Image (cartoon, grey):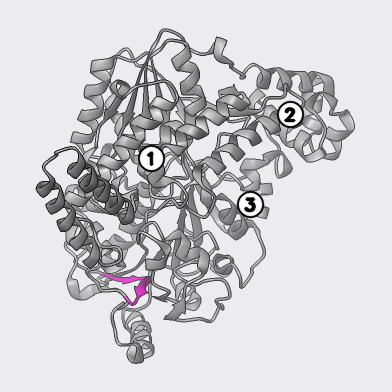
């Protein structure tokens, strides 16, 4: 069969003879699922070690389709998606164009969707996204680019949607469609309730979709309520479909789309009916798939101590019995006979897992003392949100600590906070003989700009600088709450973040150089790094990239502990160390979080969890301790968790 035959099942990306990535080496693709897992997975699913290798694999597949169609003397017709997930794909396609000669002259593209109403030059429009991330960087003919119009007259929207469908048909249909997946399972903007026969149309956006996009628009109230999207039938008509998902916040919906029944409330499940659809996910997004979460339920497994621990913890929580109280009957009834046979008795495997988890608990006496430590904090509050309790213990252990705030976090400050601080400054200037005229002029300029500012508009450099100063002052106050001083704070203000928008620039050499300089100056024994895979806008991931690149060739390499941010916590089976917190220590940590007043009460980027950050932290840290209690280990009030990289 031809790779473009709609009945063909695509091979694993990167498995062909041509290695279009040059000397980049093999992709980090997981082993294919066994027969048991395949019987549960109704859509073929490839799991990658990270989003970078996923992006390279998908870009290779796109390049193969382009070359195959061009070799046949035809245009390649691509359906393209926007959002953070396909950014790595577009980055690799641009690299392939520049370095490998991949041409887009004979490529026709159709984008999935666009907000309505929205001007094409709006920083948040998908039209602008595509030109900034791909089209302006390759040799595509502008006339071959098709994106739904977000600023057309409402009376003509239906006709424009029909014309979009006709344009796809005239191009010969879509050869390869790229999709992301929303938390509700939407593909494109086909929200819950979208039918299998739907075509390109104007839709009303789901509440969850709008809330998920709130960060991009600086508030849910600024997110358009409608969008134009290709329909489910339009997507299913593509000859091949690749659907991408990254991050653990997508794990539940990936599992539902891949293993669940077809359901009109979850549009992605319709892809089960497509003959050539594959999911491409990173390990975080794959975490809830049965073959990864509970592989012993679907296939024969090779038992390691780590997998045994995963199984025993699952069994303990499922049965409601403490680990040391699990019986042979429990193992047999829950498809774990092979684990029982390997160890000989329930008591032996129970003891193994109980001791492995117990050995991870590290109170203050087992934490580093007298060491040089850098805590890298992507935003100016991640340090206290994620590891405020541990930082306090490290202070008491007389470590030499530097907290490096990697970005300014200025896009996460509300305009009303700027007005409030400026008003305070004007008032204090009159009382303290400060140059009141300059302060008043500053307030007048800023107030005038903010009054005329359109929803989602990028702030002026002056306003961004004021917002940076607000967050820096809050960060220092947070440090003082746990016993550090302003001398221990470093504000790196990495360039990649300085866009004034939620969408950032790629990590560049200057970002890496700034981090490297700090490493060379401090020569740390231990560093703490954000390993949060659910950060909805990728700043944590990008900061980690800058650190990893700065550490390349750095000697002696410091020990690295990964913490998580406001979105998730390491599970007790993932964690290398579990640091217990007393009630007083958790209260102190929350007090440090309170110092970040611009993020309190109503954070600009809350995600789908409407609780304040301190409430999430309290719940998360107490739940980690509660899990240990349910497993039958020592009872603690709260816990922070870390993975040693």
Expressed as whole percent of the image width and height from the top left, the position of residue 520 reads 24, 17
Q: Quadrant of the C terminus?
A: top left
Classed neighbour count for the residue bearing mark 1: other residues with Cα under 10 Å, few (<14), some (14–19), many (≥20): some
**Local secondary structure at mark 2:** helix
Q: Nearer the viewer, mark 1 or mark 2?
A: 2
Disc 1 secondary structure class: helix
Instruction: Decide: is 204 above or below 464.
Output: below
Type of secondary structure dominating the magenta stretch: strand
- Can residue 176 be seen by looking at this rendering? no
- Which is more N-terminal, label 1 or label 3? 3
Compared across the picture, whether 467 is left or right of 321 comes to left
Task: From the image, tell me which residue sits under label 3.
Answer: 38
Does 169 sit above or below residue 595?
below
Which residue is at the front of the view, 509 or 25? 509
Q: Position of residue 262 (x, y in %)?
A: 64, 68
In this view, the residue in front, 497 or 380, is 380
Closer to the N terminus: mark 2 or mark 3? Answer: 3
What segment carries the magenta color? 108-117
């Amino acid at each position: 069969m031809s790779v473009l035959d709609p009945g063909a099942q695509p091979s694993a990306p990167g498995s062909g003879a041509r290695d279009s990535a040059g000397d980049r080496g093999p992709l980090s693709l997981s082993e294919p699922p066994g027969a048991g897992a395949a019987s549960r997975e109704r859509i073929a699913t490839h799991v990658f070690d990270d989003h970078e290798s996923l992006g390279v694999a998908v870009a290779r597949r796109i390049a193969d389709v382009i070359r195959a169609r061009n070799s046949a003397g035809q245009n390649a017709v691509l359906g393209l998606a926007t959002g953070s997930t396909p950014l790595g794909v577009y980055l690799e396609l641009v690299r392939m164009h520049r370095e490998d000669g991949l041409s887009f002259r004979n490529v026709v593209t159709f984008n999935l969707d666009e907000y309505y109403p929205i001007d094409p030059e709006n920083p948040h429009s998908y039209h602008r996204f595509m030109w900034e991330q791909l089209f302006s960087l390759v040799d595509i003919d502008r006339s071959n680019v098709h994106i739904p119009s977000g600023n057309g007259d409402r009376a003509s929207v239906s006709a424009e949607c029909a014309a979009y469908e006709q344009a796809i048909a005239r191009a010969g249909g879509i050869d390869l469609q790229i999709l992301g997946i929303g938390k509700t399972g939407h593909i494109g903007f086909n929200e819950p309730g979208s039918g299998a026969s739907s075509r390109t149309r104007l839709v009303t956006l789901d509440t969850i979709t709008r809330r998920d996009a709130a960060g991009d628009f600086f508030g849910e109230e600024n997110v358009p309520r409608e969008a134009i999207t290709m329909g489910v039938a339009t997507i299913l008509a593509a000859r091949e479909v690749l659907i991408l998902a990254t991050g653990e916040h997508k794990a539940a919906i990936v599992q539902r789309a891949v293993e669940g029944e077809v359901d009109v409330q979850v549009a992605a499940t319709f892809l089960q009916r497509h003959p050539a659809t594959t999911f491409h996910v990173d390990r975080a997004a794959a975490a809830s798939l049965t073959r990864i979460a509970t592989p012993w339920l679907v296939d024969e497994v090779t038992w390691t101590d780590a997998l045994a621990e995963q199984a025993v913890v699952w069994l303990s929580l499922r049965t409601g019995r403490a680990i040391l109280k699990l019986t042979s009957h429990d193992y047999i009834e829950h498809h774990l006979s092979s684990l029982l046979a390997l160890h000989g008795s329930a008591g032996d495997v129970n003891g193994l897992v109980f001791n492995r988890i117990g050995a991870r608990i590290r109170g203050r006496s087992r934490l580093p003392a007298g060491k040089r430590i850098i805590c890298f904090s992507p935003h100016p509050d991640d340090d206290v949100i994620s590891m405020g309790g541990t930082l306090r213990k490290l202070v008491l252990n007389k470590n030499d600590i530097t907290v490096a705030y990697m970005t300014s976090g200025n896009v996460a400050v509300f305009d009303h906070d700027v007005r409030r601080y400026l008003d305070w400054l004007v008032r204090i200037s009159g009382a303290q003989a400060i140059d009141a005229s300059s302060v008043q002029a500053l307030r007048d300029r800023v107030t005038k700009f903010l009054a005329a500012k359109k929803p989602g508009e990028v702030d002026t450099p002056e306003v961004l600088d004021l917002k940076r100063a607000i967050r820096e002052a809050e960060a220092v106050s947070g440090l003082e709450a746990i016993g550090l001083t302003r001398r221990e704070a470093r504000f790196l203000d990495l360039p990649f973040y300085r866009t004034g928008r939620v969408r950032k620039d790629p990590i560049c050499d200057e970002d890496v150089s700034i981090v490297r300089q700090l490493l060379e100056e401090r020569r740390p024994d231990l560093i703490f790094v954000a390993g949060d895979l659910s950060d909805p806008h990728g700043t944590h991931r990008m900061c980690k990239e800058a650190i990893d690149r700065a550490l390349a060739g750095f000697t002696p390499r410091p020990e690295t502990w990964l913490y998580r941010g406001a979105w998730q916590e390491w599970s007790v089976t993932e964690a290398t160390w579990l640091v217990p917190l007393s009630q007083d220590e958790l209260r102190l940590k929350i007090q440090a979080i309170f110092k970040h007043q611009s993020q309190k009460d109503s954070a600009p980027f809350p995600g789908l969890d409407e609780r304040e950050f301190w409430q999430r932290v309290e719940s998360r840290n107490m739940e980690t301790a509660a899990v240990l209690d349910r497993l039958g280990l020592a009872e603690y009030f709260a816990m922070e968790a870390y993975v040693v990289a």
